[in-house]
Amino acid sequence: MVDKELLESIEALNKFDHGDDSDVEVQKVSLEVPRTRPSDIKELRKRENLTQQSLAAFLGVSVRTVQGWEIGKSKPNGSARRLIQLLGKNPDLINAIYVN
């Protein structure tokens, strides 16, 4: 027999799915997007032996955009900064994306 608490949880989730959040506790978490300095981007690229062209391809931006970031002419948007953060913490992402 299914546990009573499990049934209650399923019922609460169904209600939540239909817009009624009275039986659930909703917690919103905001993760700050890290700031990046021009030197951070260039250092990451050099450390991982990436050309400006390969970093641009990974991030889905133009080479000119990467060049602009590296000299401080422009700044990466939030999505690009998050990808740069992930690449810095897990350089194998490049291989995971391009090998598969």
Image (cartoon, grey):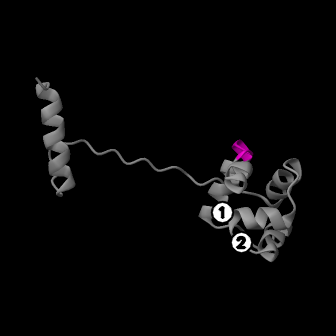
Look at the numbered disc 1 and give the secondary structure of its residue.
helix
Which-is-in-front pick, marks 2 and 1?
Answer: 2
- Quadrant where the image shows the N terminus: top left
Q: Quadrant of residue 64?
A: bottom right
Identify which amino acid the numbered label 1 is placed on: Ala
Q: Which numbered tag is attached to residue 61?
A: 2
Q: Earlier in the sequence, mark 2 or mark 1?
A: 2
Res. 36 image quadrant? bottom right
> Which residue, as the protein is rendered here, is positioned at the far front?
100
State the image coordinates of residue 51 (x, y, percent, origin top left): 87, 61
Sort mark 2 into few (<14), some (14-19) or many (20+) by Cα contacts within 10 Å. Answer: some
Task: Measure the alpha-carbon separation of dots 2 and 1.
Answer: 9 Å
Say what secondary structure mark 2 lies in.
loop
Question: Looking at the picture, how far across and down is residue 85, in whole percent?
Answer: 68, 50
Taking 80 as reference, is 53 left or right? right
Give the vertical position of 15 relative to 1 (above or below): below
Q: Label 1, on which residue?
A: 80
Q: Which residues are magenta?
A: 88-92
Left or right of 47 in this view: 29: left
Q: Are marks 2 and 1 in contact (CB under 8 Å)?
A: yes
